[in-house]
Amino acid sequence: MAKFLHHRLDPASRLIRLICAEYGASLDMEQISPWKREADFMAISPAATLPVIIESGGETIVGPLACINFVEKNYAPTSIATLIPDDDAMQAEMWRMLEWILFKLNDEVTRYVLEEKLGRSERGDGSPQTAVLRAAKTNLHEHILYFDWILGSRAWTAGEEMSLADFALAAHISTLDYLGDMDWSKAGETRDFFARMKSRPSFRPLLADRLVSLPPSANYANLDF
Amino acid sequence: MAKFLHHRLDPASRLIRLICAEYGASLDMEQISPWKREADFMAISPAATLPVIIESGGETIVGPLACINFVEKNYAPTSIATLIPDDDAMQAEMWRMLEWILFKLNDEVTRYVLEEKLGRSERGDGSPQTAVLRAAKTNLHEHILYFDWILGSRAWTAGEEMSLADFALAAHISTLDYLGDMDWSKAGETRDFFARMKSRPSFRPLLADRLVSLPPSANYANLDF
């Protein structure tokens, strides 16, 4: 079984866990704190990027794009439809939304919230900066308006078929929800979408995740939030 | 012929132009200034991301990841080896480096330099902020140290075979070189690599690029720089 370096609240790690669960692939999980930038880990992932898959032959697959492509090529069963749509237009829209979620949403919201609420305490580096958290909150509000609009106009994030983009969005939302940053009163369509994603069997292990130092928000594991 | 919305100095647009030239695919090019955030363009690309391919049927393919996947699927000739290596390990390394170049290098260096030196003047928004340019320069120095180390240990950016990662890196370097931001005295292996890339036929149209408002650095088009 391949080894999987991840962090429970890292959204890219959560995305790969979800895809693997959908495809029925098991991983031997080992938690890493990328915020500590430990030498052993940096030797494998020089940008401190998670997740990392380490194959039994020793090959390392580092970062979300490499892991997505590896899992699609090696773990996707041939008997079921994969999470990459066949149709060119929908495939293009899936990559556009994946890029938005994995890089834009991450860089404007999720990674700041994680750094302030988790990274600092893991490094013993003072308390969260409220100005940064406030900026992330304002950015998140704009992103949710966009996702509400998108999900109001079609069944799934990238179109009428479920795709990798849905799992990427649900992974980020679940991290933000764990940290108490989702204002559900202001997220109509995105809330309905997340309720659907949350009740999938692949989501169960994520809802059981707990960090001892940082417990989840009250309704994190609740399917009826 | 598909329409291609791009900007001459946008590194992701340059990457797609290079891949298409390598594959012998022609594009009907139309320059866009993403910094002006014009309504017509934002309706197509809500994050103001370039490049965009508009198919004759009207399908739009938005952003570097969607364009890379579309070009690989539709324009890669079956008669030559494509720029995505077959081998799992090298493919993983290619995606790791692509992610690094398209997102990390871009977010820490290239997009700041472009915004300060070009975006501001295109919007009529004052002169470049020297503090931002200084930070980008410091970041670029760190990136070049890493690329020097990588290119000192293997023939190409992702391993012993040429791949998409080489064109992504050359695209960013050529933009920074146009803008006069490459300190060639401090880039040994990266310089040798760029000299090899620059002499490929696919690079010629890029070396002929000129912006009226912003001429290139002295040796931009010089193969012996």
Image (cartoon, coloured by chain):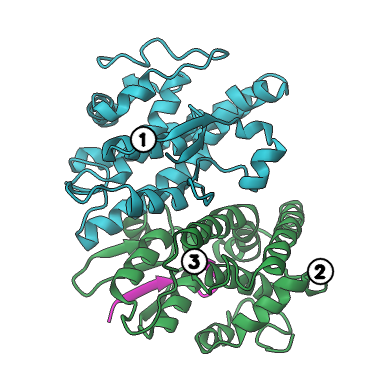
Chain colours: A cyan, B green
B67 relative to A37, above or below: below
For badge 1, the amino acid type reads Ser
Horizontal and vertical percent position of residue B145: 75, 60
The residue that mark 3 highlights is B12
**Magenta stretch encompasses residue B77:** no
Q: Which mark identifies residue A26?
A: 1
A127 relative to B58, above or below: above
Residue at x 60% of width, y 59% of height = B115
Q: Secondary structure at mark 1?
A: loop
Q: Is residue A223 left or right of residue A100?
A: left
Q: Secondary structure at mark 2?
A: helix
Image quadrant occupied by the N terminus of chain B:
bottom left
Residue at x 54% of width, y 82% of height = B206
The chain holding disc 2 is B
Residue at x 30% of width, y 69% of height = B73
Closer-to-camera residue (B32/A216): A216
Graded by Cα atoms within 10 Å as few (under 14), some (14 to 19) or many (20 or more), the crowding at tag 1 reads: some
The chain holding disc 1 is A
Q: Which residues are magenta?
A: B1-12
The residue that mark 2 highlights is B186
- Whether labels 1 and 2 belong to a single chain: the reply is no
